[in-house]
Image: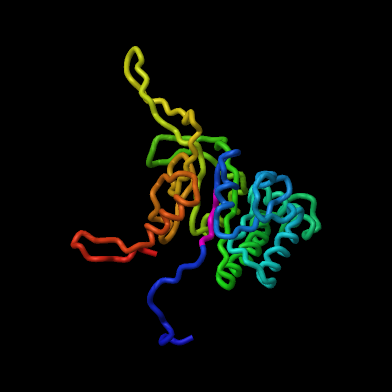
Amino acid sequence: MRLSEAQTGTVELPPRILLLGGEKRGKSTFASHFPSPIFLPIKGETGIDALNVPKLPAAKTFGEIIEVLSDLYTEKHDFRTVVIDSISALDPVVIETALADGGVKSVTKLGGGYGAQEQVICEYWRSMLTGLDALRSDKQMGCVLIGHVKPSPKVVNDPMTDPYDTWRVELRESVLGFLNRWADCILFCDFKKYARTVSGEQDQKKIVHADTIRERCLYTQYAPGHPGGGRGIYGHLPYELPLSYESFASAVESARQPKSDTKGKKSSARA
């Protein structure tokens, strides 16, 4: 490699997306509208049974997942997006494989113990993400990893704010941190909520209620109450969108377009 090979400009590859949300929020339906998807369900998940999309039998072992990614890389097909549903169901599958490969019966014994188990577990996830990255760079395939959330069991004590509750992804913290760094875009699905003012004897206060018509929304950026965020053009999306692929794709395209600065000149959106 020589310095003369240095290039300028940006390279845009298909996105690596973490799609998070509670039960029955429409995550799988949303993912089914990505370009030419193929679903890889994990044992225990039934969210795509009613969807008319290409789907494989539920993977029961981690080896089956790696085999599917290998087939997508080597065989001829027209799929453009691989959807894994879900990473929450995948976590125990990875643990089962790690225990069997390590010849131990307890997670605390993986890698010899003394905290090494988290590194061992992350290596399995890293091998899967390596396969997804190969599909992305060599086959121009995007990926969507679906994950479930639940209310956090403890209040977040942020030194910059008052304490607050939040949604927590159903996944090991070490793995979640690894996936957050890997993903280009973290999306959160939920029902839209509105605040209404209630008059009391002494003062007024706002109470937030879920939308009675159960309007579903997609949140693209982090907020104290939920995950989210993105890099490049995905960091410039509107905070809230309707939960539809058309709205998401339109917002991505808008973020991709050159922006006008205050002097009327054109400047490219940061990548």
- State the image coordinates of residue 159 (x, y, percent, origin top left): 40, 41
- State the image coordinates of residue 12 (x, y, percent, origin top left): 46, 68
Q: Is residue 17 magenta?
A: yes
In this image, 243 relative to 173: left or right? left
- State the image coordinates of residue 41 (x, y, percent, origin top left): 69, 52
- State the image coordinates of residue 169 (x, y, percent, origin top left): 57, 45
User: Camera-side residue: 158 or 191?
Assistant: 191
Magenta segment main secondary structure: strand
- Which residue is at a point 57% across and 35% down the rendered structure image? 153
Asked whether the viewer can see residue 112, the reply is no
- Which residue is at a point 55% across and 36% down the rendered structure image? 151
User: Camera-side residue: 74 or 122?
Assistant: 74
Asked whether the viewer can see residue 41, the reply is yes
In this image, 244 relative to 39: left or right? left
Quadrant for residue 63, please give it. Answer: bottom right
Q: How many marks?
A: 0
| Residue 176 vertical placement versus 77 (above, below) | above
Q: Residue furthest front?
A: 52
User: Camera-side residue: 201 or 109?
Assistant: 201
Q: Is residue 204 magenta?
A: no
- Which residue is at a point 50% across and 33% down the rendered structure image? 214
Q: How is the image coloured?
A: rainbow
Which portion, as a residue range, is magenta? 15-19
Quadrant for residue 203, please give it. Answer: top left
Q: Residue furthest top?
A: 201
Task: Quadrant for the C terminus, please.
Answer: bottom left
